[in-house]
Image (cartoon, rainbow, N blue to C red):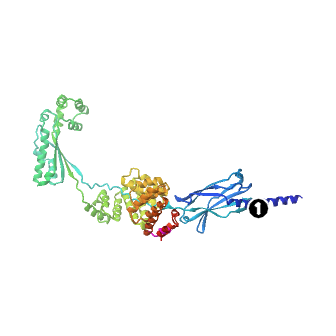
Amino acid sequence: MRKLFYVFLIVGALTYSSCTLPQMIKAAKDQKMAVSPNPLEVHKDTVNFDMSGNLPVKMLKKGTVYTINTFYKYGENELALEPVSLKAEDYPNSATEEPKVSKSQMFAYKDAYRVGTVEIEGVAAKGTKSKTTPRMPVATGIITTSKLVQNSYFAAFAEHGYNNQEELIPVIIPDFIFERGKSVLRNSEIKADKGKQLDAYIAAKNVTRTVTITGTHSPEGAERINKKLSEERAAAIEKFYRAEMKKYDYQQKADEIKFILKPINDDWTEFKNALAAYEGITADQKSEYMNIINAGGTFEDQEKQMKKLKTYNKVFKDVYPGLRTAKTEILTIKIKKTDDEISVLAKKITKGEAGQDALSFEELMYAATLTPSVEEKAAIYEAATKYGSNWNAHNNLGAAYLQMAINNPSQAADLTKKAAAQLEIAAKLRETPEVHANLASIALYQGNPYKAYSHATKALRGANNEVTRGVNGVKGASEIYMANYSAAVSSTSSATDTDVNLFNKGLAQLLNKDNSNSASSFAEATRKNSNFAIAYYGAAVAAARSGNGDAVVSNLTSAVKIDSSLKEKALTDLEFAKFSATETFRNALK
């Protein structure tokens, strides 16, 4: 009897198990599973989606486990995702309530995954026994609109530091000294070194803008009482200057020179300066004079008080004569090389036909701006790097290589390596907005939008308007890669209005759910570049999201006319799922 009882238990258990699992599999047909988003979407090189739903009431049986296996099937291949297991013991109310299922899934995106399906299967298990449901598709995938982002590059050149405008430089002639109470320019002064210097300057016929002559007097009464003495001393120098111009045949050039006469009366400034430099009396004795001046009062009363000082006669003899002067300051135009001369010398330097002394560093840096050829710019900047440790020379050489890479995509790999080497040197010498702007572009070339974003952010700190607008394009593209779409809208809106930046602006707006403005930005990009196929494609996507079938067809027609490879992409692009079956859509892609 005991053996018979054991056999009964075993047979009963097997019978229960064999009945339970098929019942669960049968019930699983009524399970409700949904995927969001559906179709799947790729953002930031990752596909994320949520799977949720309910199992039927009474489906989970005591002692069983129900596992939902999820797969992403593409072509003949599939990607197994993380399973979800539901134990009956965890759902004590499953006999009256539907057990809820919730699972977040993710996988790294590959281009091979673009066309595929999310499938699930259920596995009911009890002990070592299990049964599996048929595969069930629950979502299609993948919308890849975020992958349309176009890299934006910007070459930031630093200032050359050369002033190519007219510059005035002062020529200071030593003071002409006059006799006490007189304004006659003595012959001894004319024959002295100061007179010879002024004569030599006038004889050279330097281009002169102004001659400012300041006449002064010493403090004592005989000088001060003659109110016109300072003015007459200044006029005496002007008279001599004009006579010299006539002697050297200036003709009409004399009329181009403006004479400014500045007579100074009753002013202690020159006296205080002269007294400070005078070594004939002590500091305490000098303070006696300064105390009188600082106490205020009329000029005449102050001078009378000074006469009572013990050192007055010494000061009168040694200091006062130097105050009876006319000071001459001439503003002449700085002699500079012409642009043509600078260009010729720069080319000679790059070819080794002239030494570094042929041009200053600033002149050589300026020479690079005079040629439209990026290759010639690079040669000049390379020569400039040999003038010493100048960050702007290395930055600009790196920027030139970067610009060459932008112009010649097939050579970009080699050129960006050369650019990076120069920019690393520049960064070690000085981290500037221009250096970081260029490093941002290099990082984007290297496929690292996060590093590009970091450099772009640093570049915007203190950058001028040109660099700000240029680097905002790089930053905006990086932010789209990073799936920070609202920030990308802001960055691209402040970027230089190139076709690429306008397209990325439209894409960022589209991904930020702003279909209307995205359509406007895509249209602006095509106006900027009528052969920009991907911009028409973007406009078609924006139209599809807005339900505008006519705009979808017209923009796709323009896109595939320029780039036929977009036909296949459009035919499998889930953005156009609602329109792909229409005849007009098919005709647009023929």
Q: Residue furthest right?
A: 1
| Left or right: 481, with 311 as reference point | right
Q: Residue at x 11, y 47 (%)?
A: 240
Residue 3 lies in quadrant: bottom right
Is 323 above or below relative to 85? above
Which image quarter: residue 554? bottom left
Toward the viewer: 381 or 191?
A: 381
Above or below 577: residue 206: above
Quadrant position of the N terminus in the picture? bottom right
Q: Position of residue 194 (x, y in %)?
A: 16, 47
Task: Magenta stretch: give its range.
Answer: 563-569
Q: Nearer the viewer, residue 350 or 568?
A: 568
Identify residue for label 1.
Answer: 18
> In front: 561, or 260?
561
Does the magenta segment cover residue 504?
no
Secondary structure under the numbered disc 1 in the rendered image: helix
Magenta includes 566? yes
- Amino acid found under the numbered disc labelled 1: Ser
x and y, in percent, of residue 28 in the image: 68, 59
